[in-house]
Image: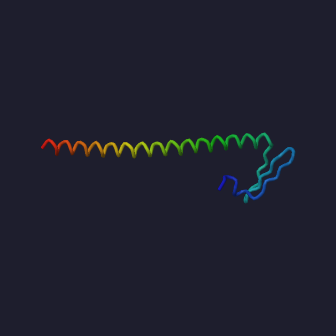
Amino acid sequence: MDACSNYKKSHYNSSKIIILDPNNAIYLSSSDFRHALQHQNQFFQKIEYTKQQYKNLKRDLGQNTIEKTLSAQIGQWKKESIA
């Protein structure tokens, strides 16, 4: 679902863009609308970047856990081998 799915109707004319949502009418000039879209795009890019960082962190933490587990198992094996 996209961010604008809750809007009922958009109307474009030469000077203003009118967006009607269920509760309010918002009047924006074309340049203001483009400016708002730029901010929206930047926001979504930051969300995607943050999601990717989260996935990388989760992967790295999982990898560290595996390495620690293997290291502990190797340490235990060494102790048992020497004894």
Q: Among all residues in the image, which is located at the extreme right?
A: 14
- Percent x, y of residue 23: 73, 58
Q: Is residue 83 left or right of residue 50?
A: left
Image quadrant in which you'd find residue 35? top right
Quadrant of the frame with the N terminus: bottom right
Q: Residue at x 86, y 48 (%)?
A: 13
The structure residue drawn at horizontal position 16% and vertical position 43%, both measured from the top left corner, is 81
Q: What residue sits 78% from the left and 57% below the top?
A: 9
Instruction: Please give the count of numbered marks on the rendered protein.
Output: 0
Q: Where, quadrant-wise, is the C terminus in this rendering?
A: top left
View extreme (left): residue: 83
Give the residue at x 28% y 42%. Answer: 71
Residue 17 horizontal side relative to residue 73, left or right: right
Q: Point out residue 15 in the picture as x, y percentages from the top left corner.
A: 85, 44
The figure's colour scheme reads rainbow
Location of residue 57 with respect to 23 vertically, above or below: above
Nearer to the camera, 17 or 54: 54
Image coords of residue 72 (percent x, y): 26, 44
**Residue 22's spot in the image, x, y percent?**
73, 60
Left or right: where 66 falls relative to 16: left
